[in-house]
Image (tube, rainbow, N blue to C red):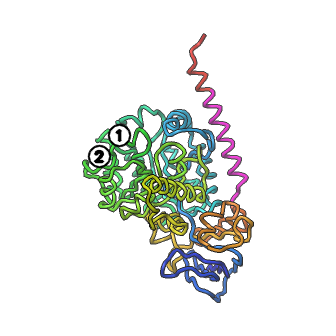
């Protein structure tokens, strides 16, 4: 029997130029696929009334350390340098597989609740072989579309982040690939989360890139952020090693040199920008316009909920505000008018949806409300006072809406949030992540006591 859902009479922002915007439109979903987007559709289907709703593709978060949901808000004033010590050298070594499961479960549900239907889970917490299994199990249970990016262990800052000689374990990556990702057509896909040059010695970098390409999985790496990595010339080093390619996503990119931008563009690489983290923690200015000016399609990501909110609305506004502030200041200083290429609210919606799918390697599947793509759809309540009255639907989404407006979330044709409430067992997820928090705090305290010299 065909499973059909009809979203009726919403303001549809398809983000597909061929489909366009429909101020009053219907979206028909059949067996998890978008079957039609038209002004009016008649079909035997479960009808969801979208009157007063703005219907958009689900947001795509192209880089989140989901395992950190257990320690949400623990480092509100941290810089990037603080993060390495306070998170990677303090909490990460204490994480058990149970902590990873709890955090990924709560973190992925947080995404769905906020209208993020696709997530790149940058999982650099694989302290044992059981850790990746726990992370993947949680992602699977939530029903989110995700790219699981297998990262290194984090049991010692010195061992894993300062010219590390320890490569990600190839045998375990191969095990995970064979066990969970033998096909690339599922709701979950796989990538390799590498640390890159400067953080690792050249032999490790080369071996990890070779591993990803052996397994035909994409690569995702942080580059050119903050006082430390901003001086590594990481993309240039990768180019010198002959490793650049279209399979690689470069995260942050705040201090890329001009020639490095060109290297990324010429090699077909993609870019993920985490604007709230970058402006707040000292990574550098979010380089959204720099990416666009080099012919790239930048995407947005949350990065760490230890320090910033976990929703896409925050990222959209952080990027929009930071880029326009930077450009306005430069133009004022030069006594020049602002250029016509200033970022627009509409562009930000495209960056958060279609561009995100492009960067995650999933644009053929998601990112726009295009007939034939999988049905990842979000409906926002535009009758709420923080949105109404709507003059421009795209700006209503990017500059007015927040998580409270996310009323309906559909992933792969399955309703994951209905009438403003997740369909999952939220109470269980909250209990597990709170228990994880308590366990980690107790372990941190015990470790601190052990480290104190005896009187």
x, y percent for residue 392: 62, 73
Q: Verify CB contact (< 8 Å) between mark 2 and mark 1.
A: yes
Residue 254: x, y in percent? 42, 49
Which residue is at the front of the view, 21 or 345? 345
The x, y position of residue 312, in whole percent, is: 58, 59
Picture residue at 37% right of the left edge, 47% below the top: 170
Instruction: State whether residue 158 appears in this view.
Output: yes
First to last magenta residue range: 424-445
Mark 2–mark 1 distance (CA, rounded to whole Å): 9 Å
Does residue 155 appear left or right of residue 111 in this picture? left
Residue at x 41% of width, y 63% of height: 292
Q: Does 167 sit above or below residue 133?
A: above
Q: Is residue 279 above or below residue 363?
A: above
Please tell me which residue lies in front, 164 or 386. Answer: 386
Residue position for label 2: 237
Badge 2 density bin: few <14, some 14–19, many ≥20, Cα 10 Å: some
Q: Which residue is mark 1?
A: 198
């Amino acid at each position: 029997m065909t499973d059909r859902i009809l979203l009726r009479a919403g303001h549809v922002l398809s983000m597909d130029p061929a489909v366009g915007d429909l101020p009053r439109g219907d979206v028909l979903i059949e067996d998890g696929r978008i079957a039609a987007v038209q002004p009016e559709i008649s079909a035997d289907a479960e009808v969801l009334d979208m009157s007063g709703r703005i219907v958009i593709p689900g947001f795509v978060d192209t880089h989140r350390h989901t395992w950190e949901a257990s320690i949400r808000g623990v480092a509100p004033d941290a810089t990037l340098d603080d993060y390495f010590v306070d998170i990677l050298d303090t909490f990460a070594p204490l994480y058990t597989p149970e902590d990873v499961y709890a955090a990924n479960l709560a973190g992925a549900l947080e995404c769905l609740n906020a209208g993020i239907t696709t997530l790149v889970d940058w999982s650099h917490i694989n302290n044992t072989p059981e850790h990746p299994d726990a992370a993947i199990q949680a992602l699977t249970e939530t029903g989110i579309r995700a790219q699981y990016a297998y990262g290194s262990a984090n049991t010692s800052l010195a061992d894993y982040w300062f010219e590390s000689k320890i490569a990600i374990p190839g045998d375990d990556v191969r095990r995970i690939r064979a066990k969970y990702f033998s096909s690339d057509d599922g709701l979950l896909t796989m990538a390799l989360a590498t640390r890159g040059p400067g953080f690792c010695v050249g032999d490790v970098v080369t071996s990890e890139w070779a591993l990803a390409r052996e397994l035909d999985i994409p690569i995702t790496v942080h580059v050119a952020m903050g006082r430390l990595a901003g001086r590594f010339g990481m993309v240039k080093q990768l180019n010198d090693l002959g490793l650049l390619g279209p399979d690689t996503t470069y995260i942050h990119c705040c201090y890329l040199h001009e020639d490095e931008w060109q290297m990324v563009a010429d090699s077909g690489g993609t870019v993920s920008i985490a604007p709230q983290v970058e402006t707040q923690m000292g990574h550098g200015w979010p380089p959204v316009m720099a990416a666009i000016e080099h012919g790239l399609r930048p995407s947005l990501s949350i990065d760490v909920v230890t320090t910033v909110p976990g929703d896409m609305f925050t990222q959209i506004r952080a990027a929009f505000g930071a880029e326009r502030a930077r450009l306005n200041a430069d133009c004022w200083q030069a006594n020049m008018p602002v250029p016509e290429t200033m970022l627009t609210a509409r562009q930000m919606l495209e960056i958060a949806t279609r561009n995100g799918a492009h960067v995650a390697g999933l644009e053929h599947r998601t990112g726009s409300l295009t007939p034939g793509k999988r049905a990842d759809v979000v409906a926002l309540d535009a009758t709420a006072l923080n949105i109404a009255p709507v003059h421009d639907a795209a700006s209503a989404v990017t500059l007015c809406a927040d998580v409270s407006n996310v009323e309906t979330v559909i992933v792969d044709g399955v309703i994951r949030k209905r009438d403003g409430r997740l369909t999952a067992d939220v109470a269980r997820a909250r209990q597990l992540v709170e228990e994880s928090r308590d366990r980690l705090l107790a372990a941190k305290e015990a470790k601190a006591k052990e480290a104190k010299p005896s009187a």
